[in-house]
Amino acid sequence: MAYVAVKGGERAIDAAHAWLAEERRGDPCLPEIETAQIAAQFGRAVDRVMAEGSCHDRELAALAVKQAQGDLIEAAFLLRAYRTTLPRFAAAHPIDTDAMQVRRRISAIYKDLPGGQVLGPTYDYTHRLLDFRLAGTGSLAGAGSQEAAAPTSCAEETAAMPRVTAILAGEDLIEGDRAADAPAEIPMGDLTRAPLAFPAERDVRLQALARGDEGFLLALGYSTQRGWGGTHPFVGEIRVGEVAVEIEPPELGFAIDIGEITVTECQMVNQFKGSKTVPPQFTRGYGLCFGHGERKAMAMALVDRAMRAEELGEERTAPAQNVEFVLSHCDNIEATGFVEHLKLPHYVDFQSELETIRRMRREAEAAASPDRREAAE
Amino acid sequence: MTPGTLLSARGLSLSFGSIPALDGVDLDLWPGEALAIVGESGSGKTTLLNTLFGAQRPDAGIVRYRDPAGHVHDVHAMKRPMLRALHRSDWGFIYQEPRQALRMPVSAGGNVGERLMAQGTASAGALHYGRIRAAAIEWLREVEIDPARIDDLPRTFSGGMLQRLQIARTLVTHPRLVFMDEPTGGLDVSVQARLLDLIRTLIARFAIAVVLVTHDVAVARLLADRILVMQAGRVVETGLTDQVLDDPHEPYTQLLVSSVLQA
Amino acid sequence: MNGYNFAYLDEQTKRMVRRALLKAVAIPGHQVPFGGREMPLPYGWGTGGIQVTASILGSGDVLKVIDQGADDTTNAVSIRRFFARTAGVATTTRTEEASVIQTRHRIPETKLREGQIIVYQVPLPEPLSRLEPSRAEAREMHALGDYGLMHVKLYEDISRLGQVSISFDYPVMVNGRYLMSPTPIPAFDNPKLDRSPALHLFGAGREKRIYAVPPYTEVRSLDFEDHPFRATRARHECALCGARTSYLDEIVTDDRGGRMFVCSDTDYCAGRREREAAE
């Protein structure tokens, strides 16, 4: 067979992209899905893409989901890559979740509390029965239940909703936001500007977790509950809702509201700690993410607390307590890149392995054969 | 620093919180001499060992060391690279748990040869596989491990053998000073006896100075020329081993000596 | 490409990368952390190499991009297109004509000249990573020049297999001070780094590290005096151009064990065939 050097890489790529576009469109007889529909009806997918893409923009995230055919890690990558091109023109004030327009707020540690337990739009108490009415084809399996009308959203003034951590802090039962001896101005790391380095401080750890893969953090959080570095967690509070984003332009000298974002915040109340000199207090784990992502925020809080093991004088034995391990592997865009890059050609290196193994076997054989000849004589 | 001494400590003090682990400890060590630090647990003997070694910084006091060229160094003022190089060449540390010092996924030969290989890269000179392997074989013999086991992994070794492998790994660079933390702890009695015998032979053969921590007075009597008795961070009594053990002056020492079970 | 800066990266980012490159050149073989950005190609596809190339490219440069030694492998094509679109620079497949060469897994057979820059795509910048997974611990070892562990690995290979088994990404000592990963180039290519007249730059996008070997720097593959480093290649000549000293790809031609060997460096091979035809 006459060997022709493989050419046509460009043509192959173009053909691959064309086919991909066809697959993405799917059956042309079906209406093309609109990004507005994705943003409106696949909200949780959009939320996850915003969280892991590290960019709060529902329309862009919806576009990414459409472009990626629903592959959420691919979509997060698209959003992250887009984010790289955006110039940074300001740093916002920290968002104030105390002033959140709460849609959902629950606490597992109090039966009732100021502001109440607000269930909000949750899957928590649904029965996981496929609802065929959604497919437009049938009736709800085991039908017969009356569904309550969704509460009409009303612009009533929300009762005061103090943070649960503030309630505990009132009795000095929980550690504060910062160490008692911490300086007033703590320089903050920025994961989007500087590479991760170890030891990593809590600010950078939380930034990494906020954009970290939900599946990975879920598994690690789960592991802490099953004994791999457990901290007896309780959900102090979960809140989901809208918060204002404020910036303070130097020309104005005061803060202005530039919009609002949806966030989910989880405060875990963990194992109390004390010493001979400091009376025992509950310790904390914190989770925060864009959009409605309780699973993510809760897992993040569990892992955050586990990673504080060294700071809190605990034995570090479990994977979730290994800061370098957790942070090096929680970014699914880095992870998928490196795992999937194995598909790229590696035949030059494999050729070296082949030659090395062939040489070793040749040399081993050559060393063995003189003995065999001797033995035969 | 007292002329002729190899290592000296003056006024070492260290507290963990409100607990004084070391309280004004002084000591001197001469070349080729073995010094045992004895006391019950909590006496501060391990803290003292780690402070002398440079692994633990004291709150007050100074540790001085005289190098082969005769220069005196403040151990805790030394820069990290220098201290690390010292730990791997002129000094050694034998841990109670050999697995702490050995590389378990590396063969016996690799373990013994590592300090030689580390020195090689430091001096940028070419390393010679044959010579390193020969040195490893020689040292396996010295510690009474069959040289045929040079390519075996440590996990196939018994506890006593692991300890002997650790010793070989440490002595391969001919250190003049070796620190030992309960070197025979955790081993059964007959294995202990053989190991102590080996250690005694090696330190005499190679004129190695030793600082040895042990709770076992019998080990001190067998290995050490001089003894330091500690209690609650202080040196209670010190002197020639036999003299102190046969004729203890301090009540605490008397207590310690009398509590040794007669074999 | 509307709305994007020359070579995609904004000037701030390029400046940041160039500062890291200068540090890297000042300390040959030492890994310099840099604030790497997400690029439109995935991590693992050469984002580090791309950021380095984007930061040093000027409109007058001539760019060659190769992967596995070939200009026409799909990812080399993809990257060359990326720069053609975002920078509009001239591109070439000829090694001698290039001012900047971005490469994955090979160094060209044609000896590089003074003034040329070769940019390597780096998957794992840390040469100690397989022996010591903690980067924090590895950083300590580099700072103290404590590389005994790597020699132990070579020793273990020789004691078990009779020779060092590392066939690619073979660790090197740069300027007598830093242990460096030359990237997964075959061990065969290592000697090309030693005292090369060209500037060698290394970019790891996912791990966010940059390092460099300036021109005429000593680069030694780790070995023992009595087990010296050996470069391995297939013991054949190229079926197309007859070369006996170039690195060869093995092509499986049928299902009965049929094989042929051709130069991995497609430009080198084509050049030899052209010259042969001209004679």
Image: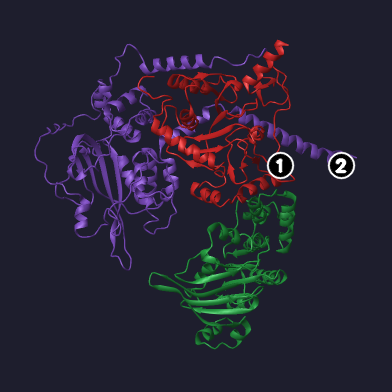
- Residue A237: in sight, yes or no? yes
Note whether B194 is above or below A96 in the view shown: below
Q: Position of residue B39 (x, y in %)?
A: 52, 77
Q: Position of residue C9 (x, y in %)?
A: 41, 28
Disc 2 target residue? A375
Q: Secondary structure at mark 1?
A: loop
Q: Residues within 10 Å of mark 2 (few under 14, many from 20)?
A: few
Q: Chain of mark 1?
A: C
Chain corresponding to red in the figure: C
Chain corresponding to purple in the figure: A
Front-most of residues C193 and B128? C193
Q: Chain of mark 2?
A: A
Relative to A12, is A268 on the left or the right? left
Disc 1 target residue? C163
Residue at 37% x, 51% y is: A306
Q: Position of residue A263 (x, y in %)?
A: 25, 38
Q: Residues within 10 Å of mark 1 (few under 14, many from 20)?
A: many
Residue C234 is marked as none
Q: Secondary structure at mark 2?
A: helix
Chain corresponding to green in the figure: B
Say which amino acid is labelled 1: Gln
Note whether B225 is above or below B175 in the view shown: below
Relative to A128, is C102 on the left or the right? right
Front-most of residues C134 and B118? B118
Q: Quadrant of the N terminus of chain C?
A: top left
Q: Decide: marks 2, 1 in contact (CB < 8 A)?
A: no
Q: Quadrant of the C terminus of chain C?
A: top right
